[in-house]
Amino acid sequence: IGIGTGTWSVAIVSTIIGFLASDYLNKDMMIGLAIVNPVYFTCMMIGAMKSLQISLSIILGAILGPAFFFITPEWSILFGGVSAGTIAYSRFLGVVSSEKIKETSKIFKWFNCIAYSVLAALIARMVVFPAGELAESSIFIRFFVLTLCVLMFLFTKKNLVYPTILSAILLSLLNSYL
């Protein structure tokens, strides 16, 4: 039972509360809350950039995800992520080897690169080509908020709380006054 059930229960209850409360929030507050997820995961990925392969996976995923949107919007995240992860790993043919799947195996490292690059492609697409409430804000405001929050993340010794809260407040304010 333990922590998994507790986490799952809090997530379910919080989702229900958020869904019910959303009817009572104004448009600018909803737009501000829509940027929280991209900011949080961007900061998490930047914190994970400890090796060249992961760093390249994240950077290429953030570039190729939106780039593939012009070719195929439905598959852009998957194509961008798999392409970026494979390029970052750069030894795709060497991945298919006789090793058992261990954390240090080539195939595990390749999947790790793909996972990070797919997440980067998803986040980049959410910021560049957003859907829903976030689409009503300017791309320049979205990039400004994301950049400022990433800088805050780096300057606060990789604390996720401050940039996450700042992103919602800042996007709400900028969207209502600019």
Image (cartoon, rainbow, N blue to C red):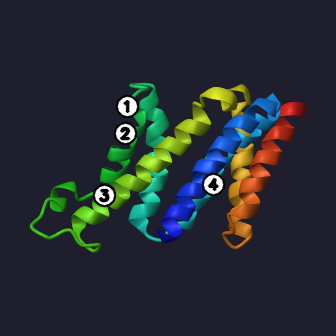
| Coordinates of residue 33 in the picture (x, y in percent) | 72, 42
Is 99 located above or below residue 76 in the figure? below
Q: Secondary structure at mark 3?
A: helix
Residue that mark 2 sits on: 78
Label at residue 45: none
| Coordinates of residue 94 in the picture (x, y in percent) | 16, 61
| Coordinates of residue 39 in the picture (x, y in percent) | 65, 51
Residue that mark 4 sits on: 40
Label 2, label 1: how far apart the Cα atoms are: 6 Å
- Circles 2 and 1: CB distance less than 8 Å? yes
Is 69 located above or below residue 63 in the figure? above
The amino acid type, in three-letter code, at marker 2 is Leu
* Mark 3: few/some/many CA within 10 Å (<14, 14-19, 20+): some
Residue that mark 3 sits on: 111
| Mark 1 or mark 3: whose residue is earlier in sequence | 1
Label 3, label 4: how far apart the Cα atoms are: 22 Å
Residue that mark 1 sits on: 75
| Coordinates of residue 53 in the picture (x, y in percent) | 39, 63
